[in-house]
Image (spheres, helix red, strand yellow):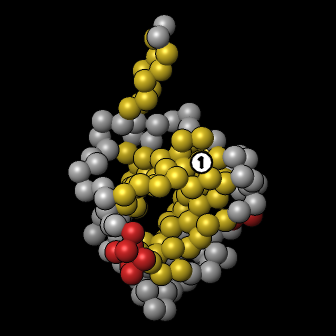
Amino acid sequence: MHSPEIIKGGIYSDNRGELLYNNDFDLSTIKRMYIIKHPDKSVVRAWQGHQQEHKYFKCIKGSFVVAWKKIDDFTNPSDNNKAEYTILSESENNVLSIPSGFANGLKALESDSEIMVFSDYKLGESLDDKIRFDKDLWFDWGAFK
């Protein structure tokens, strides 16, 4: 079982502009991608758990708090451990990897923020694997305004 991790990217600048790169992000298992747009900072998208699916998150505009929680029992998860989190920002070219066995959630920290999500599951496979939990479990989203 893997743990969530940040895959560090970089930005190269010269007189021609900027080149954003993430040479350590292996896309060989990716089957789909999509973009989530948050027009304001009040929306919380949480919690979606995946027993098999691996997700990757890359902020492309603004910034997001992205949280994750290891799920011990997908039918009746415990409250033992609080969620962990990181901030993803367009000013950093990082990708957050959240493997199977975790629930994830996110909230924009700036209006009109956008986050790109990559998945190793096709849409139909993902829908069969997705388990939703109440957004108020495990994390204080209100601490991020």
Q: At label 1, which amino acid type do we have?
A: Glu
> Of all residues shown, which one is farthest toward the top?
15
Quadrant where the C terminus sits is bottom right
Residue found 36% across the figure and 36% down from its top: 22
Q: Quick check: 78 left or right of 98?
A: right
Q: Quadrant of residue 128?
A: bottom left
Counting other residues with Cα less than 10 Å from the Cα at mark 1, is it few (<14), some (14-19), or many (20 or more)? many
Q: Along the line of sight, which residue is nearer the eye, 5 or 59?
A: 59
Number of numbered discs visible in the structure rendering:
1
Above or below for 108 versus 43 = above
Residue found 73% across the figure and 47% down from its top: 111
> Of all residues shown, which one is farthest toward the front?
124
Q: Is residue 15 visible?
A: yes
Label 1: element kind? strand
Residue 79 point in image, percent of width and height: 55, 83
Q: Quadrant of residue 29?
A: bottom left
Q: Quick check: 75 left or right of 91?
A: left
Residue 83 point in image, percent of width and height: 54, 68
Residue found 47% across the figure and 55% down from its top: 34
Q: Quick check: 27 left or right of 141?
A: left
> Of all residues shown, which one is farthest toward the bottom?
76
Q: Is residue 70 visible?
A: no
Above or below for 49 versus 144 = below
Residue 6 point in image, percent of width and height: 41, 49
Residue found 30% across the figure and 55% down from its top: 30
Q: Quadrant of residue 85?
A: bottom right
Quadrant where the N terminus sits is bottom left
Residue 130 point in image, percent of width and height: 44, 78
Residue under pointer 1:
114
